[in-house]
Image (cartoon, helix red, strand yellow):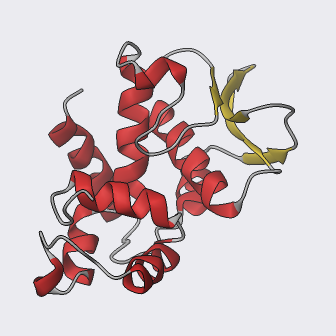
Amino acid sequence: MRPPEIEQRVEQLLRKYNINDGPVPVERIAEAEGLPIIETAYAGEVSGALIRSNGMTGIAVNSAHPQTRRRFTVAHELAHFALNHEGEYIDSRFTVIRRDGRSSDATDKKEIEANAFAANLLMPTEFLYRDLKPSYRGEAHLSDNDLKMLARKYRVSPLAMQYRLVNLGLLSPE
């Protein structure tokens, strides 16, 4: 699926649940879509999984990870479901840009799509355009304080927010 199609899918989901501002309640969306969330401590680098068993589907999330990571994991696993990816997905640690081993080398299309969907869902383009001061768009620098405030608003890590803004062309790479 191409990036514009992924963004369109996210926009449809946001409209469906009448979400107009951040932070996007990804946990509420997942549960409304019929995906109960189970937090459990995983050993190693496992972030979460989309689990299908006996006709039921749910999301397992590593409770040992920080809240921002858990939110991304829920959004990522919701993406596998919303994009009709078949099978079960057990995802190692990943970030918005630096994906796990399968997606960082651009060989696992489904992981790349799920990461893109998650970034779009947690930090919707339209919301970010609205929240950024016009003078910041495309500028080389956004103050660290402003970046952290924006990340806090969307309940994502500052690094995830920085990557998202760079990918959208709203912030120059440093």
Q: Position of residue 154 (x, y in %)?
A: 46, 72
Is residue 49 left or right of 30 when viewed as pictured? Answer: right
Q: Quadrant of residue 111?
A: top left
Seen in the picture, residue 8 relative to 109 is either above or below; the reply is: below
Seen in the picture, residue 111 relative to 108 is either above or below; the reply is: below
Seen in the picture, residue 125 relative to 167 is either above or below; the reply is: below
Q: Quadrant of residue 117?
A: top left
Seen in the picture, residue 83 relative to 154 is either above or below; the reply is: above
Count all numbered tags in the image, as a single digit: 0
Q: Position of residue 134 (x, y in %)?
A: 11, 84
Give the quadrant of the C terminus.
Answer: bottom left
Instruction: Please report the residue visible at 40 percent of the width from the left and 63 percent of the height from the top.
Output: 161
Residue 85 seen:
no
Instruction: Please report the residue visible at 48 percent of the width from the left and 33 percent of the height from the top.
Output: 99
Q: Quadrant of residue 66?
A: bottom right
Is residue 56 left or right of 141 when viewed as pictured? Answer: right
Instruction: Please report the residue visible at 54 percent of the width from the left and 28 percent of the height from the top.
Output: 100
Is residue 142 left or right of 71 when viewed as pictured? Answer: left
